[in-house]
Image (cartoon, grey):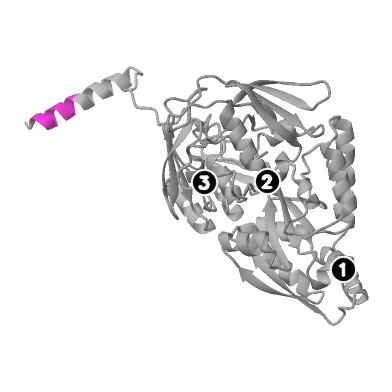
């Protein structure tokens, strides 16, 4: 008998004997994961880009900040292990973790924090959320383990702001190359980026904190809903944390191999309006658009019923939320009357630019049909994400667009001097200034309620729905976030059971 065959037969007999005794032969625990997401990031530096896809790859995995936001939306220590706040709320003293190194071996210390924050606040900063740092007057480093941040006025949201992806700490030695070769302090180190396909990362063997349970993680880019469904069913991917095909969720719920988790996000999905563009500068026209859109029909048609209607730019799960969905009920006749009053009784033509996500493409077709029913014709342009960022977000060359704003607690964007809505209102800016200087929680909630009501009254945008998070993953995976309090696919506690 062939020796190899004989040994194979013998091994099989032994294995059967062990199984007969209730003892299974040892198998290596699975320690790699392939997770998919719909949009490819334009680059991998969260401190110089607005795209949510950047944070969805690198937040908490590769880069870390002084604080971090956990799965419940609470602030936790990160590179700062503790902090103290002065009685007047103006001075925050952070004590840093010890023994931390960046992935390239350089040491992390207070000077890196000062470099990162000064860089974000600089006049020529390209940080997409530069407003997060407006309250900071100075950053000082009395020693290598201590950072002192002094504020211009109290800022009740400072610790939360420092947990954003835009506030992660980078090193001066590697910051210039982070777009293509991200170097952070996190539990995973960047390995390679295969453009148009995947980003690969490996466990950081020198991590200062609790090591990642996974040895490897791959994030695949699969934007097409049908392709995502096929890849999941075939086992080509293990998880899809924001599954783009809600119509297929029932199929996965019926399949014992998978777990389907419907969570919440910070994603206010809106029909964004260029408030400075021609007829759209007229409040009556904007209100007409709001009355022309049937939110529930958009949710049912584009999201297969997954989503919560909203009437302003605020997440319904937040305790300060005000339900303003009744401000502009679906009323096509009211919409027509407002358009006629504004001088557009004979019709109006607007552009509608739609980025790649299915909520935008599918929702855009439904919204366009609803607007057409009241005499508003739309010229639809389907644009790629890079085009959307260039034309709409930075260039404000658009009339209407559909997008989900997934940044946490981002109502302050309406008070910025320059933002793609082109909404300029001194009263709202004053509200935001007062909010930023208020620490008391109940007082902050009151101001947030006023801000929500102001945005609804001014009909700045057509507020559609809060994006649900559709999670589909292998039933044996544990540790993935069910909700999305920030833009993240946090893999730091993920494992196979």
Of labels 2 and 3, earlier in sequence is: 3
Of labels 1 and 2, earlier in sequence is: 2
SS state under label 3: loop
Of labels 1 and 3, earlier in sequence is: 3
- Give the answer, above or below, for where 373 lies relative to 496: below
Q: Does the rendering let one see residue 312?
A: yes
Mark 2: few, some, or many residues within 10 Å (few <14, many ≥20)?
A: many
Q: Kindly give the residue lying farthest to the left in the view shown.
A: 1
Residue 289 occupies quadrant:
bottom right
State how far apart marks 1 and 3 are (Cα). 39 Å
Mark 3: few, some, or many residues within 10 Å (few <14, many ≥20)?
A: many
Residue under numbered circle 2? 129
Q: Is residue 6 magenta?
A: yes
State how far apart marks 2 and 3 are (Cα). 16 Å
Q: Nearer the viewer, mark 1 or mark 2?
A: 2
Residue 481 occupies quadrant:
top right
Question: What is the number of the mark on residue 282?
Answer: 1
Q: Does the magenta stretch mainly form a helix, a strand or a loop? A: helix
On the rendered structure, is 121 left or right of 328?
left
Q: Quadrant of the N terminus?
A: top left
1 and 3 marks in contact (CB < 8 Å): no
On the rendered structure, is 411 left or right of 471?
right
Q: Nearer the viewer, residue 420 or 403?
A: 420
- Give the answer, above or below, for where 288 lies relative to 309: below
Instruction: Please report the residue visible at 7 percent of the width from the left and 32 percent of the height from the top.
Output: 2
The magenta stretch spans which residues? 3-10
Q: Position of residue 396 (x, y in %)?
A: 70, 64
State how far apart marks 1 and 2 are (Cα). 29 Å
Q: Position of residue 27 (x, y in %)?
A: 34, 26
On the rendered structure, is 189 left or right of 450?
left
SS state under label 1: loop
Question: What is the number of the mark on residue 44?
Answer: 3
């Amino acid at each position: 008998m062939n020796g190899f065959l004989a040994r194979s037969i013998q091994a099989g007999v032994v294995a059967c004997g062990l199984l007969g005794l209730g003892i299974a032969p040892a198998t290596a625990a699975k320690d790699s994961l392939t997770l998919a997401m719909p949009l490819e990031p334009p680059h991998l530096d969260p401190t110089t880009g607005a795209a949510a896809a950047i944070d969805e790859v690198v937040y908490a995995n590769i880069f870390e900040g002084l604080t971090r936001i956990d799965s419940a939306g609470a602030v936790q220590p990160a590179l700062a292990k503790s902090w103290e706040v002065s009685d007047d709320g103006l001075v925050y003293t952070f004590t840093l973790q010890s023994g931390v190194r960046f992935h390239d071996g350089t040491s992390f210390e207070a000077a890196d924090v000062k470099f990162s924050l000064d860089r974000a606040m600089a006049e020529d900063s390209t940080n997409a959320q530069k407003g997060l740092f407006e309250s900071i007057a100075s950053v000082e480093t009395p020693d290598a383990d201590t950072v002192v941040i002094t504020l211009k006025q109290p800022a009740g949201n400072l610790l939360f702001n420092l947990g954003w992806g835009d506030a992660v700490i980078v090193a001066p030695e590697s910051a210039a190359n982070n777009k293509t070769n991200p170097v952070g302090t996190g539990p995973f180190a960047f390995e390679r980026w295969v453009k148009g396909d995947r980003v690969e990362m490996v466990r950081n063997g020198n991590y200062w904190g609790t090591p990642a349970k996974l040895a490897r993680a791959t994030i695949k880019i699969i934007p097409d809903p049908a392709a995502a469904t096929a890849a999941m069913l075939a086992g080509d991917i293990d998880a899809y944390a924001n599954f783009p095909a809600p119509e297929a969720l029932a199929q996965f719920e019926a399949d014992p191999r998978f777990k389907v988790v419907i969570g919440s996000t910070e994603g206010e999905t809106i029909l964004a309006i260029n408030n400075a563009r021609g007829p759209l500068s007229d409040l009556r026209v904007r209100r007409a658009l709001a009355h022309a859109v049937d939110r529930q029909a958009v949710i049912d048609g584009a999201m297969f019923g997954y989503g919560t209607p909203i009437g302003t730019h605020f997440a319904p799960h937040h305790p300060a939320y005000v339900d303003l969905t009744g401000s502009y009920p679906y009323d096509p006749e009211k919409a027509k009357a407002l358009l006629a009053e504004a001088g557009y009784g004979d019709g109006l033509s607007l552009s509608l630019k739609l980025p790649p996500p299915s909520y935008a493409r599918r929702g855009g077709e439904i919204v366009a049909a609803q607007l057409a029913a009241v005499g508003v014709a739309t010229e639809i342009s389907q644009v790629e994400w890079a085009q959307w960022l260039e034309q709409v977000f930075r260039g404000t060359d658009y009339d209407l667009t559909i997008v989900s704003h997934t940044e946490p607690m981002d109502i302050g964007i309406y008070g910025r001097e320059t933002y793609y809505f082109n909404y300029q209102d001194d009263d709202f800016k004053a509200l935001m200034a007062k909010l930023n200087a208020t620490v008391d929680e109940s007082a902050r909630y009151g101001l947030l309620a006023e801000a929500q009501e102001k945005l609804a009254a001014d009909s700045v945008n057509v507020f559609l729905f809060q994006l649900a998070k559709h999670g589909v993953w292998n039933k044996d995976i544990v540790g993935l976030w069910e909700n999305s309090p920030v833009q993240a696919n946090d893999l730091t506690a993920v494992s196979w059971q």
